[in-house]
Image: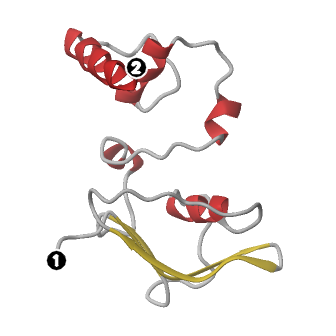
């Protein structure tokens, strides 16, 4: 059995005095497609924030665990090339009118927009073209 992309075990997270997630266990395999659906207040954002470590479970390991590719801790710069999470929070952080091309190219740098310290190679431009062609 291969290491799951994402694994949660017995995760409980409180938002104030109420549980946003309660005893959630889930395993997502590499290559598996998953949608997180539910009404407002059902814990979708809390789930994502548990994965991104914006919120932490009430109980420490081993009582509960959140693992990405088998690990419970990562250097974010090592993880970024392996996993991307897109939420509507991104819209509030994006204050400039970037073109579609700039937006796609910024994915190579895990940034919002292309900055002066970024070196965009011809190979990156070619890959961006391939990806944009898939979306037409």
Location of residue 135 (image quadrant) = top left
13 horizontally vs 33: left or right = right
The residue to which callout 1 is attached is 1
* Furthest residue toward front: 136
Q: Is residue 71 visible?
A: yes
| Residue 32 location (% of width, % of height) | 32, 60
- Taking the image as shown, residue 22 lies to the left or right of residue 118, namely right
Sequence-wise first label, 1 or 2:
1
Q: Report the side of 74 relative to 44 (left or right).
A: left
Quadrant housing the N terminus: bottom left
Disc 1 crowd, CA 10 A, few/some/many (<14, 14-19, 20+): few
What residue sits 34% from the left and 27% below the top? 108
Q: Nearer the viewer, residue 15 or 135?
A: 135
| 113 relative position to 136: left or right | right
Query: In this figure, which residue is indicated by the disc labeled 2?
Result: 136
Residue 114 appears in view: no
In terms of image quadrants, where is residue 8?
bottom left
Vertical placement of residue 49 versus 86, above or below: below
């Amino acid at each position: 059995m291969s290491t799951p992309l994402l694994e949660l075990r017995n995760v409980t997270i409180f938002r104030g005095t109420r549980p946003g997630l309660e005893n959630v266990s889930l395993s997502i395999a590499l290559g598996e497609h998953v949608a997180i659906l539910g009404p407002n207040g059902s814990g979708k954002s809390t789930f994502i924030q548990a994965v991104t470590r914006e919120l932490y479970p009430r109980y420490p390991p081993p009582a509960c665990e959140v693992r990405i590719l088998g690990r419970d801790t990562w250097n974010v710069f090592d993880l970024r090339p392996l996993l991307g999470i897109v939420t509507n929070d991104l819209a509030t952080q994006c204050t400039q009118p970037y073109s579609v091309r700039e937006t796609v190219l910024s994915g190579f740098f895990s940034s919002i927009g292309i900055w002066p310290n970024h070196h965009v190679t011809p190979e990156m431009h070619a890959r961006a073209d391939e990806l944009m062609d898939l979306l037409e």
